[in-house]
Amino acid sequence: MELFEADYLLLFVISLAVIGSAIVKTGVGVGAGIFLLPLLSLVLPPKTALGIGAPAMLISDIVGLKLYWKEWNSREALLIVPPSVIGVAVGVVLVKFIPSTIFRYWIGAFAVSFVLHNLISKVWKISITIPENWRLGRRSGIIFGFAGGFVSAVSHAGGAVLSVYLLTRKLEKRIFVGLFILFFVITNVAKTVGYVRIGILTVDLVLMVFVLSPLIVLGSLLGNHLNKKLSQEMFRTLVLVIILITGVKLLY
């Protein structure tokens, strides 16, 4: 898709999707990737939608990196980040060989499952609690780093995997967030390079995302504002409804 030959309606939908994902990331933290991917898949080939997601989310991650620069545990970072890059590489190779039709259903099923999990957890008051005396060993960071990178490469949902490990480390809040941001920045850079190499992300699409970067930054600021003004529960429910509708649409 050539940047300046793209349909105006398509550009509008892409713009709406990247702004929305930025709002979600800073507004509710429900998962910007799982919001962005199904929405883009409604108007773009699913693999192209996956490709655009990496540089789009990288822009907001870079802003976060500046805010949390060096506010992470270096030992944990060395355990998590290198295997996450390997996980991304393996995931990118898998994406290359998955037929587009199957990949579309994969995205739809993942989106619906994500929403149902959140709704069931809310209705039955199910929550993950980490016992005070239970901690995964440091070496588990290597496994979770790899798994997070892999899942991130195929669905932009690696943060959900990594959180299982980080929650057991009992880290101070800013160190916790700093590790997440470092993980996202590194994996999104790796995904962008990988997607370009397998041909689902072109230089034109990267340029398109760059042109839309002011909107992404604006969306991040708007999400932060809405977080302070609106009911968190109402906002989160609205996001889940949008994800559910797009997921069902992809399946049928």
Image: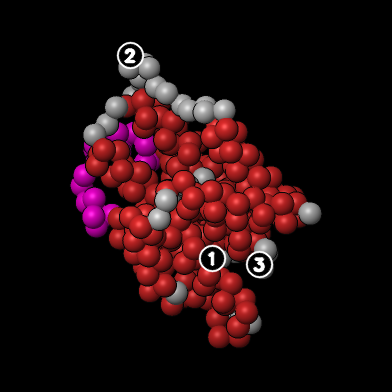
Q: Can you give x and y, in whole percent of width and height, for residue 133 in the image?
A: 33, 14
Q: Is residue 98 above or below residue 43?
A: above
Please report the bounds of the magenta region as a residue range.
65-82
73 in magenta: yes
The answer to whether residue 163 shows anywhere in this view is yes
Task: Name the outermost residue toward the bottom.
Answer: 4
Q: Can you give x and y, in whole percent of width and height, for residue 19 in the image?
A: 47, 67
Disc number at residue 17?
Answer: 1
Q: Few, some or many C-alpha atoms within 10 Å of disc 3 (few <14, some 14-19, many ≥20)? A: some
Between residues 163 and 154, which one lies in front from this camera angle? 163
Q: Going 48% across and 39% down the picture, which residue do you hit? A: 160
Residue 84: which quarter of the image? top left
Amino acid type, label 3: Leu
Residue underneath mark 3: 44
Label 2 and label 1: CA atoms lie apart by: 42 Å
Amino acid type, label 1: Ala
Q: Is residue 4 above or below residue 234?
A: below
Disc number at residue 133?
Answer: 2
Of circles 3 and 2, the one toward us is 2
Label 3 and label 1: CA atoms lie apart by: 12 Å
Q: Is residue 95 above or below residue 132?
A: below
Q: Few, some or many C-alpha atoms within 10 Å of disc 1 (few <14, some 14-19, many ≥20)? A: many
Residue 219: which quarter of the image? bottom left
Amino acid type, label 2: Asn
